[in-house]
Image: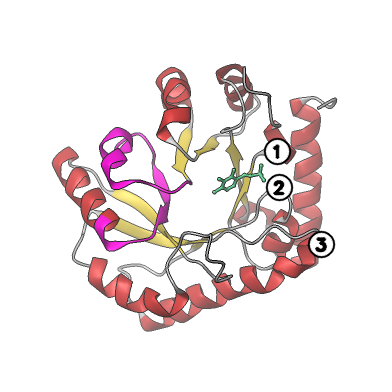
Amino acid sequence: MSSTLQERIAEVSRRIERACVKGGRDTRDVKIIAVTKYVSLETTSAVLASGLRDIGENRWQNAESKWEALGSQGIWHFIGHLQTNKVKDIIGKFQYIHSLDRLSLARELHRKAEVAGLDVNVLLQVNISGEETKFGLNPDGVPDFLQEISKFDRLKVIGLMTMAPHEEDPEFTRPVFRGLRELRDKLNGLGLTAEPMTELSMGMSNDFEVAIEEGATWVRLGTVLVGHEEES
Ligand SMILES: *Cc1c(COP(=O)(O)O)cnc(C)c1O
């Protein structure tokens, strides 16, 4: 990529501002997670030095060396599919888990958090688009799921996350993002969580502006923001 990190951050910030104007959103309600899964420790360090604080990784295997070096400097978000046997590696290291999608994972997160004496912030991953290749809870099953996990009092359910299908025209992703917002509002109306859910983690490089117009509070940006480096 020819532009510098600073230039890309500035350009993304301008685009976020424009989307906020269009969607009637307050820019302070939209936070950037810099997804560093495609980039090196050096680039991740530069991202933190540039003032971005929230770092997203989708596999512990990729994140480990970065976390060991930079863990205390950022706020770490686990955004990928989480295997139950990997919970022990990430508990206490990632402040937010965006991919809670099944009961066995909730049980293990609660158990490990209990042992560590911690609370864990979680978002439920919901498969709004219904694509078979996507992880996530079926939207209709979320009320029952929330009821089942309410006994796991170490888990603080703060919001919902989804991934939209890749579309050439991001406009086509709008119903997915709108669906997640409407689901959150409906669930809050049912009062199934200790506190109303505030967060919507949705929107990636290709579609973040549409996601913001539809209510995203966290956009997860890799390629457009921090770049995509070749494997070395
Ligand atoms: C990789 C990834 C992203 C960022 O992808 P880009 O298209 O590069 O912005 C966002 N969310 C999740 C869950 C990811 O795995």
Residue 169: mark in rendering: 3
Q: Residue at x 74, y 57 (%)?
A: 209
In the image, residue 159 lies at what x, y percent? Answer: 45, 62
What residue is pinned by disc 2? 205
Amino acid under label 3? Answer: Asp
Q: Residues within 10 Å of mark 1 (few under 14, many from 20)?
A: some
Foreground residue among 85 and 22 = 85
Asked if labels 1 and 2 touch by Cβ distance under 8 angstroms, the answer is yes
Q: Is residue 178 above or below residue 203?
A: below
What residue is pinned by disc 1? 223
Q: Secondary structure at mark 3?
A: loop
Q: Which residues are magenta?
A: 80-104
In the rendered structure, the answer to whether residue 104 lies left or right of residue 75 reads: left
For the N terminus, the image quarter is: top right
Q: Residues under labels 3 and 1: Cα distance?
A: 17 Å
The verdict on label 1 being within 8 Å of ligand 1 is yes
Q: Is residue 154 above or below residue 130?
A: above
For the question of whether residue 76 can be seen, the reply is: yes
Q: Residues within 10 Å of mark 2 (few under 14, many from 20)?
A: some
Amino acid under label 1? Answer: Thr
Foreground residue among 151 and 126 = 126
Amino acid under label 2? Answer: Ser
In the rendered structure, the answer to whether residue 3 lies left or right of residue 118 reads: right
Q: Residue at x 35, y 34 (%)?
A: 93
Ligand 1 shown in quarter: top right
